Amino acid sequence: MAAGEWHREKGDYLKNESFAEDKGNVPETGCLSIIVLGASGDLAKKKTFPALFNLYRQGFLQLNEVHIFGYARTKISDDELRNRIQGYLSSGNEGSEDVSKFLQLIKYVSGSYDAAEGFQALDKAISEHETSRNSSEESSRRLFYLALPPSVYPQVCKMIKNYCTTKSDLGGWTRIVVEKPFGKDLASAEELSSQIGELFNEPQIYRIDHYLGKELVQNLLVLRFANRFFLPLWNRDNIDNVQIVFREDFGTEGRGGYFDEYGIIRDIIQNHLLQVLCLVAMEKPVSLKPEHIRDEKVKVLQSVVPIKDEEVVLGQYEGYRDDPTVPDNSNTPTFATMVLRIHNERWEGVPFILKAGKALNSRKADIRVQFKDVPGDIFKSQKQGRNEFVIRLQPSEAILHEAYGQATWVGNVDCSK
Ligand SMILES: NC(=O)C1=CN([C@@H]2O[C@H](COP(=O)(O)OP(=O)(O)OC[C@H]3O[C@@H](n4cnc5c(N)ncnc54)[C@H](OP(=O)(O)O)[C@@H]3O)[C@@H](O)[C@H]2O)C=CC1
Ligand SMILES: O=C1O[C@H](COP(=O)(O)O)[C@@H](O)[C@H](O)[C@H]1O
């Protein structure tokens, strides 16, 4: 598939299915600049640059059209940034021609997030690239990816708007991608929304939750709503409890600048795990249009009753404060578990247990659906644990059904806890 085709398909889908504001005819040719703000950080090296590399390898980013810019305060050279990310590009590709060509697409500009000079320098670097590609301003496309803590989004968006947008509305575009967590609480999320909304139109703003891109998360709706097998079982009559669990076997590792201000609840539970919970618990949407799916998710969230203090456990792993980027007196939780209760006809009485922790003994993300005991059970003496259905989101996707210690699984891993 040629690079432009994907965009056209997406444009048509949006035009037909959704988003009335999307004009559907935005040109997807011309010079493309992808700017990763926070390029010195963890997200950029572990996920954003590797994802861009995969797009490049699959032919979606053309050498003659694309340039990638990293921007952050850390003073490093182009080559130092390239060295930092090289090891995170798909394993087995080290030293390959693809890797070195991709790395040559990347330039780095250093500057602060709240002063004009840095963004003027960034704009100059982007404009030079556009000129070298003979792109008129009208057809230049600029995508700004904010791999940054949300606290700096407003100032960064203002700087982008003032100094770095494409210079004309006639053709090309400027878009921004913002990460989770979107603010710290309702008030700050609403404020952030209005701050960004004053600078950019809604179709220019892309909000990301990368858990929604995981294969088995994407398959949850098919699993639930296209299988007669599951339809009659998925309710309070059959399900005893649902556990949505995220574990990581590493700590913050220098990410204190972002993580310590937010903690594990805002980092993982409020976004990734709640998105998963919504897909597990929601009713069938009217269609697969984004708005219809969103509406059903919102109903689930509106049905969650306030969480009781006695059904929450918080913790911090030993050694967290030894990270030099974490304040010595930090009280930020790195582990949290809580029980959510959904007050509706399907789920009344079924606890949804959410759990997330860093620096634990393994790296896994699971949805565990535990069923009620079989009435009139004749196997009591052989019983080992619950009748359980497990969806392993990562590291290796798998689906497991377990009853009386007999496991049936699809995938290539053992789904033990
Ligand atoms: N790490 C991950 O796997 C994922 C992270 N995210 C999201 O990405 C965003 C960034 O996270 P991550 O990259 O992990 O965090 P980092 O702590 O690595 O921060 C990224 C960069 O932002 C700058 N920075 C850090 N703290 C501050 C601060 N307090 N004020 C201004 N600038 C700061 C630093 O760059 P410099 O000092 O050079 O300017 C740093 O390199 C967060 O919103 C997070 O939720 C989302 C999905 C996955
Ligand atoms: O959003 C985040 O996710 C990562 C974990 O992502 P995964 O896809 O590797 O499970 C987490 O490490 C980080 O703290 C958080 O910001």
Image (spheres, rainbow, N blue to C red):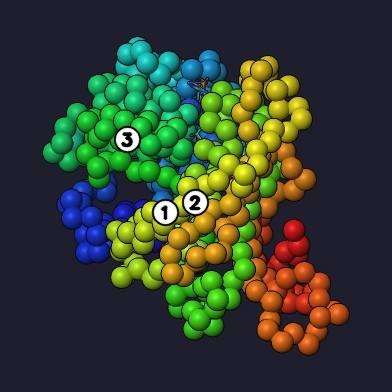
Residue pictured at 41% horizontal, 57% vertical? 303
Q: Is residue 126 left or right of residue 15?
A: right
- Gap in Å between the C-alphas at discs 1 and 2? 9 Å
Report whether residue 8 is seen: no
Q: Amino acid at mark 1?
A: Leu
- Decide which of 28, 360 is in the foreground and name it: 360
Report the quarter where the N terminus lies.
Answer: bottom left
Closer-to-camera residue (18/372):
372
Q: Is 172 located above or below residue 252 in the figure?
A: below
Q: Secondary structure at mark 1?
A: helix
Quadrant of residue 286 within the rendered picture: bottom left
Residue farthest along the left direction in this orientation: 170
The answer to whether the residues at label 1 and label 2 have Cβ atoms under 8 Å apart is: yes
Residue drawn at 58 percent across, 59 percent down: 351
**Comes first in the chain, label 2 or label 3:** 3
Q: Secondary structure at mark 3?
A: helix
What secondary structure is found at the residue carrying circle 2?
Answer: helix
Q: Which residue is mark 3?
A: 190
Image location (x, y in percent) of residue 379: 80, 84
Observer-nearest residue: 199 or 119?
199
What is the crowding at mark 1: few (fewer than 14 residues within 10 Å), some, or many (at least 20)?
some
Q: Residues within 10 Å of mark 2 (few under 14, many from 20)?
A: some
Circle count: 3
Residue at x 81%, y 72% (from the top left corner): 384
Find the distance from the CA under tag 2 to the CA under tag 3.
Answer: 19 Å
In this image, 164 relative to 334: left or right?
Answer: left
Q: Can you tell which mark lies on residue 301?
A: 1
Residue 362 in picture, x, y percent from top left: 75, 48
Per the image, the residue denoted by label 2 is 274
Q: What amino acid type is highlighted by mark number 3?
A: Glu
Badge 2 residue CB within 8 Å of ligand 2: no
Amino acid carrying mark 2 in the image: Leu
